[in-house]
Structure formats: structure tokens, C-alpha cells
Image: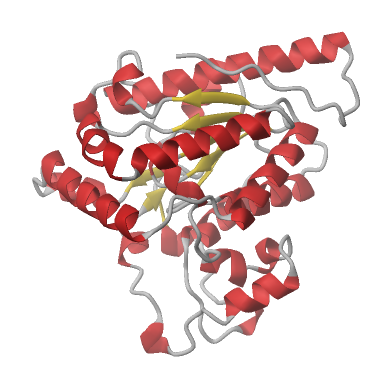
């Protein structure tokens, strides 16, 4: 397991030697913390501290729709926006990513790095989410030095619309062009019967630092649902998606990914970007059905970006290469 050395961007003003050393040390420490966190997450090691008081999504979010809209689609973006509002001190480490990264506990990273963290990973987390929330945090705490750990998978750059949370929340949509927001707003439900049921979010409990304490997967396990059944579903879904979509990176998502990296470099040390592991059975089932091509495309893209914008890169897609990881804890 190796981390790429951050590339050099000739357009950036050169840092003083001491500043470069501090950034390298900070980045290396965060790389180590990320790797250890993945071992804990997939190996079942006991890393939990005292249990945080759970916050239901309905309690964390505003009970009334913003801007007077009669209909409001509650998403985890709104939930975490409200949790951020409750912080008295700025976070020092922001955790971005998709659904599996929502489980990463900022308190564990703090024990390793000393950095106060906040989990800003989302269901179907996208680069656009990271862009909006990094700007939001910087606007609220303009003098905070921010570290970024970003957990990606090959689906993070497929073409799709903005989350309803980014469109409906004024403090989030302000970071996007008005024309884009207007187009995405037309996709929102216009009748009460068109609103999504939101059952998954209703079953989710959050810690005050943004990480997920419990969701529908925990309830399924408690009911006796085996991992093999969940993997069967994931394999079928991935194969169907790969068979019906082209292996392309959506230009808009790539643009916001790069903008977020550049902003993160201005606000702190080079970010750490991690390609998340897949369960060995899932990886074996989808590798030659479209996953491998998408993985190669994403790696080439990331390494190309890395030549322009510094960041550490950990490719941990194969869970068997993560030291100490237990596939059964997936």
C-alpha cells in the first residue's frame, strides 16, 4: 500500500521549505490515519469510544422548508448542514465520500492526528457535494486550517443530477451557477404525492460529528439478513448499471472535483484521496463486467490531475491488499 507524492503545480507560488515540510508531514500523517481507519472499518477492530447521543434525521433537519417552498425533499445534506450549525468550534478535518464513508468516526481520526473532524460523506456523495460544503465551512470559519480526507469509488463521477439538498438549501446552492440550479430545480417534486418516501433517512441516526451511528443496514443485520444476500443484490445492481451506461467521467463532476482540490490546497495541506475497497466477491463478479475499465479510467484521470494539483492518492480498491482487513466485516 503506497501513497503517491503530491505533484507540483508550477502556477502555485512556491512554499518556503519549512512550510513544505509541515505540509508533507501533515499529509503523511493523515494518509496513515486513513489507512488505519480503513483497517478498523473493515476488520472489526474495537475503535469506538463512548457512544455519542444519536440524532435522528428529523430532529437534525429544519422542520420547515427553506425559502417558503411548499414542498421540501429532506436529504442527508440538510441533516448535516444543521449539525454543522450546532458546532461551536471549526472542524479541522473534513471527511468526504459516499455512503460507506458515512460510517467513519471523526473521533477515531482525532485520536490518531489530534484533528477535530466532521463527517461530510453522503448517500451517493458526489464532488459537487464536497465543493458546496468545503466552501460553506470556509465561509463560516475563514481562518480555519482545513484538512481533507476524500473517499471515492468508480461511481462517483457518473452522470447524474445534483442532490435535492444542494438545490433546495440556499446556503448550498449559492456555490453553483444560477442556470444549473434552475435546471435542477425543475426536476424537484411539484406535488405531495411525488415526494420520495424517505424511509432510509427516517431510519438513520447521526452522531453530532456527522457520522452515521445506525441505518437500515444495521436493522437488516439485526433481522438476520446475511452478507451474502446483500452482495447478491450489489452484484446484480452493478452489472445492470455497467451494462446500460458508458464508462465515462461526467465533465461537470470532474470540474467540481478539481475545483475542490484546488480550494482544499489553499485552505490546508494537500488532501488525501482514497479509492474505497470492494468486497472480494463483489470485485470478482464485476471486475470484467465494466468495473475494471472504469477503474483504469478513474486512475488515469486522478494521476493526470495529480500532476497539476497536489494530493495524496491511496488505491485500496482490492480489499485483500488492505493489511488486517476482514472481508466478512464488509
Residue extending farthest bottom: 191
The residue at the point 69 percent across, 63 percent down is: 171
Counting from the top left corner in percent of width and height, residue 66 is at: 62, 75
Q: Quadrant of the N terminus?
A: top left
> Residue 48 appears at what percent x and percent y?
37, 26
- Residue 192, quarter of the rendered image: bottom left
35 and 299: which one is in front? 299
Q: How far across and down, in percent of the image, does residue 61 sit?
A: 51, 63
The reply, left or right, for residue 76 in relation to residue 218 is right
Please say whether residue 117 is visible from this viewpoint: no
Judge by depth and name the residue closer to the eye, 157 or 219: 157
Q: Is residue 75 visible in the rendered structure shown here?
A: yes
> Which quadrant does the C terminus fall into?
top left
| Left or right: 282 in relation to 259 | left
Q: How is the image coloured?
A: secondary structure
Query: Eyeballing the image, is 292 above or below 206?
Result: above
Looking at the picture, how far across and down is residue 188, in whole percent?
51, 79
Total numbered circles: 0
Residue 281 sits in which quadrant? top left
Residue at 74% across / 67% down in the picture?
177
Query: 326 or 320, which lies in front?
Result: 320
In this rendering, the answer to whether 262 lies above or below 46 is below
Decide if residue 126 is on the left or right side of residue 115: left
Write the residue at 35% across / 41% down: 291
Amino acid at each position: 500500500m503506497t501513497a503517491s507524492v503530491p505533484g507540483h503545480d508550477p502556477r502555485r507560488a512556491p512554499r518556503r521549505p519549512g512550510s513544505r515540510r509541515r505540509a508533507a508531514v501533515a499529509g503523511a500523517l493523515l494518509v496513515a490515519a486513513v489507512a488505519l481507519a480503513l483497517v478498523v472499518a473493515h476488520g472489526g477492530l474495537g475503535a469506538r469510544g463512548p457512544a455519542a447521543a444519536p440524532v435522528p434525521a428529523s430532529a437534525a433537519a429544519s422542520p420547515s422548508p427553506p425559502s417558503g417552498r411548499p414542498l421540501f425533499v429532506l436529504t442527508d445534506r440538510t441533516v448535516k448542514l444543521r449539525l454543522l450549525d450546532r458546532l461551536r468550534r471549526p472542524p479541522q478535518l473534513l471527511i468526504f465520500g459516499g455512503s460507506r464513508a458515512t460510517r467513519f468516526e471523526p473521533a477515531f481520526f482525532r485520536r490518531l492526528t489530534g484533528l477535530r473532524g466532521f463527517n461530510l460523506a453522503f448517500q451517493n456523495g458526489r464532488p459537487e457535494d464536497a465543493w458546496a460544503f468545503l466552501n460553506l465551512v470556509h465561509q463560516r470559519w475563514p481562518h480555519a486550517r482545513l484538512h481533507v480526507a476524500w473517499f471515492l469509488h468508480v461511481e462517483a463521477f457518473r452522470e447524474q443530477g445534483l442532490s435535492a439538498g444542494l438545490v433546495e438549501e440556499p446556503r448550498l446552492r449559492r456555490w453553483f451557477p444560477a442556470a444549473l440550479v434552475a435546471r435542477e430545480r425543475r426536476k424537484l417534486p411539484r406535488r405531495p404525492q411525488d415526494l420520495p418516501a424517505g424511509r432510509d433517512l427516517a431510519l438513520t441516526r447521526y452522531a453530532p460529528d456527522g457520522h452515521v451511528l445506525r441505518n437500515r443496514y444495521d436493522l437488516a443485520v439485526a433481522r438476520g439478513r446475511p452478507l451474502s444476500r446483500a452482495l447478491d443484490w450489489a452484484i446484480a445492481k452493478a452489472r445492470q448499471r455497467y451494462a446500460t451506461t458508458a464508462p465515462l467521467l461526467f465533465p461537470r463532476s470532474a470540474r467540481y472535483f478539481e475545483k475542490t482540490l484546488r480550494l482544499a490546497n489553499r485552505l490546508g495541506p494537500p488532501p488525501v484521496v482514497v479509492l474505497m475497497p470492494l468486497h472480494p466477491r463483489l470485485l470478482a463478479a464485476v471486475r470484467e463486467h465494466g468495473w475494471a475499465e472504469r477503474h483504469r479510467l478513474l486512475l488515469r484521470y486522478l494521476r493526470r490531475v495529480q500532476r497539476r494539483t497536489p494530493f495524496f492518492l491511496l488505491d485500496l480498491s482490492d480489499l485483500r491488499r488492505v493489511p488486517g482487513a476482514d472481508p466478512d466485516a464488509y
